[in-house]
Every structure is written in structure tokens, then in C-alpha cells.
Image (cartoon, rainbow, N blue to C red):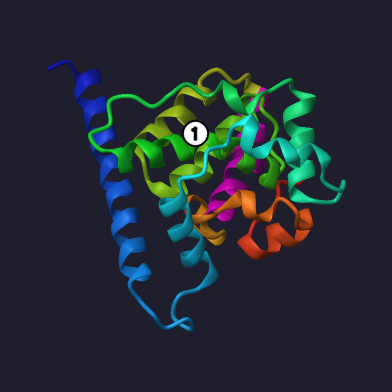
Amino acid sequence: MPTWERNFRQSWFLWEYYVLSLISRISKLASKDDCCFVSWIHVSAKAVLLERPRVISANVGHAWDLPENTFGAAYARFMGSRNFSPDDRPPVRFMDTDELAYVAMRAREVHDFWHTLFDLPTNLIGESALKVIEFRQMYLPMCMMSVIGGTARFSKKQRKLFYQHYFPWAVRAGTQCTDLMCVYYEQHFHEDLEDVRRKLGIVPVHAP
């Protein structure tokens, strides 16, 4: 088996392990009746797995009509300023179960929510920084491989900026925020953007 194929298979194995661990953890929490034990984030994660919301225009289109200070409006501005559509994400393939397929799709679809909350651009530096956060959250080799591949295309100036400013910030940001895959983001569209960030422990990136 070629090295690249072996690495690819190992990455997907770890992704499946992460997803199954997440499902197992949430299922155990969902069985608890003590409301003092089950925090709001665990309740949110349970709702995501049970309801399986999709980030598509039919479901998130109302964000464009929300007040300017809200998370939903910030997301709408992010998408509109780049001519992005929630419907552009390709379907997930090669997953063994519906649960794995859904969580993998959810990870793709909430990507733009993360850009909005962390205030990261969609250029190479911004995408690489977000991959560092994802790696810190999920420890998936494919995330770090994306960082390595992205930084290889940096200019000398960009590389210095990334490793001096964005990389250390991304490590801290990914460490201190809540489990990003356990958040029912759509339920927070109507809330003030800064309140959502505080609730999730998210510190947006600052200009270098």
C-alpha cells in the first residue's frame, strides 16, 4: 500500500474514532437526569445529534433579516461579502454509518460559523489558522496536514507573520474554547455576537 494511501486511511480511522467517541460521550450524558450535571453545552450537543440540523439556505436564510449586532447577522455578512452560499458544500462520502456521515457533514457546514466567530478571513493565513484550532480541538492528522500544506505556499513574510502571530493565537483559542462540534449554532443566531463568543469561550483574532 502506498504511503499516501496508508496515511489517508489512518486519518479517516482517527476521524471515525473521534466521531464515535463524541457520539458515545453525548449519549452517556443524555442518559443523565440531573440537570445540574448536564450543562447547556451537553444539552446542545444532544439536540444536534437528535435533530441533525443542516446548514442550508432553507434553514439559515432568516439570518439575513436579523439585527446587525447578532451572530446570525454577522454570519450573513460574512457569507454575503464573499458571495458564499450555504448550499455549496459537497456531500460527504465513504462513511460507514449515518451517524459518521452526519457528523462529518456537520463539521463541513459549521466551518463558516467558525470563521465568523473567530473573525478569521478566508485567505490562506485565515484558513491555516482555523485548521490549527480544529487540530487543537479534534487532534485529526488531516488538520495538521492542511496547515503544513498551506504554510508551504506562504511567502517568507507570510510565514513569519503566521508563526509569530496567528499560530500561537490559534493554539490558545482552540484550547480555551468549548467543544466546537457540540454547539447548536443556529439556536444562537438571535443573540448578540459578543455574548455568543463569551458563552463559547471564543477570543477572536486581533490584527497583528
Label 1: few (<14), some (14–19) or many (≥20) C-alpha neighbours in 10 Å: some
Quadrant in the picture for the C terminus: top right
Residue under the image location 36 percent in, 77 percent down: 32
Looking at the magenta stretch, what is its main secondary structure? helix
x then y, percent, for residue 91: 43, 24
Q: Using the image, determine if residue 204 lies above or below residue 155.
A: below
Q: Is residue 207 left or right of residue 131?
A: right
Q: Nearer the viewer, residue 48 or 132?
A: 48
- Quadrant position of residue 12: top left
Q: Is residue 58 left or right of residue 33?
A: right
x then y, percent, for residue 126: 64, 32
Residue under the image location 48 percent in, 43 percent down: 134
Residue under the image location 74 percent in, 45 percent down: 72
Which span of residues is magenta-colored?
Answer: 157-174
Q: Which residue is mark 1?
A: 108
- Quadrant position of residue 105: top left
Q: Nearer the viewer, residue 50 or 151?
A: 50
